Amino acid sequence: MTASSSASTSRLLIRDLAQIATPRVTSDGGTVRGQGLGTVEVIEGGFVLSENGRIRAVGRMRELSQVPGVVEEIDGRGLVAIPGLVDCHTHACFAGDRVEEFALRAAGASYEELQAAGGGILSTVRATREAGEHGLRDSLLRHREWMLRSGTTTFEAKSGYGLDRETELAQLRVIRDAGGIPTWLGAHALPPEFADAGADAYLDFLLTDVLPDAALLAEAADVFLERGAFTETQARRYLEACGAAGLTLRLHGDQFTESGAIPLAIELAARSVDHLESTGPDGIAALAASDVAAVLLPASALFLNRPMPPARALADAGAIVALATDFNPGSAFCESLPLVCGLACTQLGLSPAEALVACTVNAAHVLGRTDRKGRLAAGFDSDLVLLDADDWRYLAYHLGGPVVRTVVVGGEIAWDSRA
């Protein structure tokens, strides 16, 4: 392998790696499902060469020829390279916290008692509105750094803690400007000012006054289809309008009840249905027969002491399975995809290989980026994580431990634990 030389070329060579682990590039370059979900290509004693933010070559050290010109080198001895992790479902743009609510829940408080104490989504709405755009930017940059240190190089984040025009659009701008992938979750909850008018009146407001500008900022739209949130009829209206505005469609569904999210997602060709803690056999079969991804959020289920989503059944049936943190202040205060991978292996019945695929290439599919993210292969973005281990399975095995040593984004070192 020989690289061309140019004075303006930026190169990064990571050499003498103990292992390189990556989902294989499929014939269509897209998602991995069925038996392929558990297949990871492992190279022993390898290198990764990046040039101008893209991967130029991946291979064994014996295949590495001299690289002419100026090149920055990283000694990979004793380290493992995996693709940069992709978090395809977060609510990372928020202000305040809900630690008091957490303490009350730990002491046995019911949902009704938490609401009476001022908890729930609306408590975060109040704090997020009060923070303003500058405060939200500071908060998201802090959360982005947490995610980066856990190996996340690509993240999605949703609005939905503003529930008014000004704050919803501010959230989307902040997410976009921080390098995240914005999703408009205007239909997250009913804001207090619409308590009397009701959900249909609130949707009138969203679709008339917010959607035109939200569609210029966001890539996708999401809705919370659940008992106590929005009905199937209301979710359909919201998603159809968002789809007509050019947004990719996603749903929060089957978290507490099966309320029609999966059939609606399939009918509207949504990109994903996320949560699925309450999904039964019919829903599993329907997802497996579709191209709608199942985004599983085990940290949320653990945080709320809910049943885990049926990951093993979904994978065995051939569904597109992805993993994400659901990072948010109320039900999953967790930014760590390595921890989620550990939960996937210990609680969901997935293998380490399936967990890695689910939070790399399949998560990249949910965000429409399978051509650039989620694999270590020539032509892909040079986003990768160096694990402080000699076996890639430590990603899930070292539960909550300091397994991430170095994070590279776009061919540049973005974070190093030794700095």
Image (cartoon, rainbow, N blue to C red):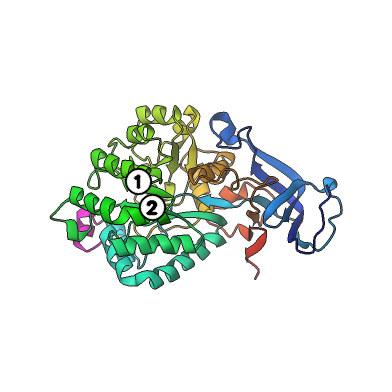
Q: Would you identify the image quadrant in which residue 275 lies?
A: top left
Rendered location of residue 100, percent (x, y)? 30, 66
Q: Residue at x 85, y 46 (%)?
A: 62
User: Looking at the image, do the residues carrying marks 1 and 2 touch, with CB atoms under 8 Å apart?
Assistant: yes
In the picture shown, does residue 99 fall above or below 232? below
User: Label 2: which residue?
Assistant: 215
9 within the magenta span? no
Mark 1 vs mark 2, CA separation in Å: 8 Å
In terms of depth relative to the viewer, which is nearer, 349 or 116?
116
Q: Amino acid at mark 1?
A: Cys
- Alpha-carbon neighbours of circle 2 within 10 Å: few (<14), some, or many (≥20)? many
State which region is magenta: 109-119
Q: Is residue 14 left or right of residue 183?
A: right
- Alpha-carbon neighbours of circle 1 within 10 Å: few (<14), some, or many (≥20)? many
- One can see residue 120 in this view: no
113 within the magenta span? yes
Q: Would you identify the image quadrant in which residue 126 lies?
A: bottom left
In terms of depth relative to the viewer, which is nearer, 49 or 314?
49
Q: Residue at x 48, y 68 (%)?
A: 142
In terms of depth relative to the viewer, which is nearer, 414 or 378?
378
Q: Quadrant of the C terminus?
A: bottom right
Helix, strand or loop under label 2? helix
